[in-house]
Image (cartoon, rainbow, N blue to C red):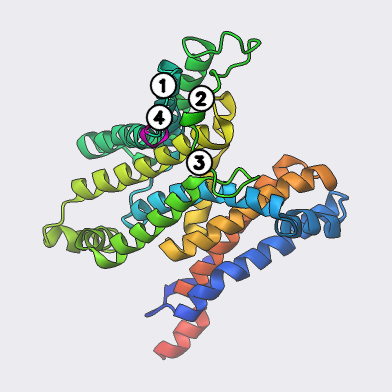
């Protein structure tokens, strides 16, 4: 008798518990914290100091919390766009590249017109950045629909191309001639900067835009017929095809929405806290937003909460690297283990373990 005969099987539950689905994210967070605390002990770090720096310090002062809000904006924007595609089973993994293209498109205005003034500049930058991200995502959509290429691989590889395009511009035609040979553009003029929300902080209008678009994402997915078609296409593609829902249209729409949101986030980054196009614009927002989207259960309201949590972990991780001597890799491990713990929790919400001897008894 083979060993697999004694292993349990995963059997899908007839109906997932709503209460269990709501409990999955906090339980996953608790499990990730415990797992990483054990890791910190093995590394010889003080777990109490790490917990204080990573999980408490971001909320203990207004200056720290304002940085959390600043980081929440791009994570929330990108995650909301990605979640729409994920629910339609269109897996856009290239938001990082779309973020970079949004930053590049937006930077074109202050770089080409450095003397321009007026309140039209920063809104135009945001719009142009969103268009740039959507166009970059459109390349993936074309390859997926016309050539049946895998959108995961295409979007991911295009992120590498976007990074090389950024490096070329900053080391070539867009390089600041007075920048002491650093790979960066000129500083943008005042009217190219997104207005701040709170005096003395870097939190800007892009956070409000992210919240408004989160509400729009909820209305789109929960109340619109197009959102309903996307969800049906993801849950039951054969039924969607039989009902006349176009798979190609769903792919195009999902990727363009994700690219639009990521490009908008990239534009807000260069027009907000940075004030110029830099090589370090690519900080992993596009990849972290994938964790945010799934940790929020791919639901617009849940994503708002998970974006705030992930932003706090990111800011707290920076604190822990200084005060608790924690390596940057440990912060990445925490984020990855959080996603893994959530996926395990959701798996047990949707499935149950069934042992072979239990099945045999029920059949007899």
Q: Residue at x 59, y 28 (%)?
A: 280
The crowding category of the residue bearing disc 1, from other C-alpha atoms within 10 Å (few below 14, some 14 to 19, many at least 20), is: some
Residue 176 appears in the figure: yes
Q: Name the residue under label 3.
A: 195
> For the C terminus, which image quadrant?
bottom left
For label 2, the SS is: loop
Q: Residue 189 carries which label?
A: 2
* Callouts 4 and 1 close, C-beta under 8 Å: yes
Secondary structure mostly taken by the magenta-highlighted segment of the chain = helix
Q: State the CA–CA distance, disc 3 to disc 1.
A: 17 Å
Going from the N terminus, do you reach mark 2 or mark 4 first?
4
* Callouts 1 and 2 close, C-beta under 8 Å: yes
Q: Which mark is residue 116?
A: 1
Residue 123: within the magenta? yes
Residue 353 appears in the figure: no
Up-down: is 158 above or below 359?
Answer: above
Going from the N terminus, do you reach mark 1 or mark 2 first?
1
Residue 134: within the magenta? no
**Where does residue 9 sit, x and y in percent of width and height?**
48, 71
The crowding category of the residue bearing disc 4, from other C-alpha atoms within 10 Å (few below 14, some 14 to 19, many at least 20), is: few
Q: State the CA–CA distance, disc 4 to disc 1.
A: 7 Å
Q: Name the residue under label 4.
A: 118
**Taking 251 as reference, is 311 left or right?**
right
Going from the N terminus, do you reach mark 3 or mark 2 first?
2
For label 1, the SS is: loop
Q: State the CA–CA distance, disc 4 to disc 3.
A: 13 Å
Q: Residue furthest front?
A: 118
């Amino acid at each position: 008798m083979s060993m697999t005969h004694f292993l349990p099987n995963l059997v899908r539950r007839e109906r997932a518990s709503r209460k269990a689905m709501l409990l999955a994210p906090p339980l996953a967070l608790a499990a990730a914290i415990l797992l990483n605390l054990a890791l910190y002990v093995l590394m010889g770090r003080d777990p109490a100091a790490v917990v204080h720096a990573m999980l408490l310090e971001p909320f203990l002062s207004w200056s720290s919390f304002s940085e959390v809000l600043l980081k929440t904006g791009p994570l929330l924007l990108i995650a909301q766009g990605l979640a729409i595609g994920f629910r339609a089973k269109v897996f856009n993994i290239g938001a990082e590249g779309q973020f970079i293209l949004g930053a590049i498109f937006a930077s074109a205005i202050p770089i080409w017109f450095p003397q321009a003034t007026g309140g039209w500049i920063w809104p135009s930058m945001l719009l142009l950045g969103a268009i740039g991200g959507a166009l970059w995502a459109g390349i993936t959509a074309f390859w997926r629909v016309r050539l049946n290429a895998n959108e995961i691989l295409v979007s991911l590889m295009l992120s590498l191309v976007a990074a090389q395009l950024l490096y070329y511009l900053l080391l070539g035609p867009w390089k600041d001639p007075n920048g002491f040979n650093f790979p960066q553009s000129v500083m943008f003029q005042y009217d190219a900067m997104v207005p701040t929300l709170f005096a003395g902080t870097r939190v800007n209008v892009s956070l409000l835009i992210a919240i408004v678009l989160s509400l729009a994402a909820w209305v789109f997915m929960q109340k619109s017929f197009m959102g309903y078609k996307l969800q049906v296409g993801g849950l039951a593609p054969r039924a969607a095809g039989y009902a006349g829902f176009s798979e190609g249209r769903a792919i195009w729409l999902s990727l363009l929405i994700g690219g639009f949101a990521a490009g908008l986030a990239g534009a807000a980054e260069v027009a907000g806290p940075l004030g110029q196009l830099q090589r370090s614009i690519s900080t992993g927002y596009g990849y972290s937003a994938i964790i945010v989207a799934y940790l929020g259960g791919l639901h617009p309201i849940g994503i708002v909460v998970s974006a705030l949590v992930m932003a706090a972990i990111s800011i707290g991780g920076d604190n822990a690297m200084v005060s608790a001597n924690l390596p940057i890799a440990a912060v990445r491990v925490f984020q990855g283990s959080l996603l893994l713990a959530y996926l395990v929790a959701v798996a047990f919400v949707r499935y149950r373990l069934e042992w072979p001897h239990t099945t045999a008894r029920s059949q007899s």
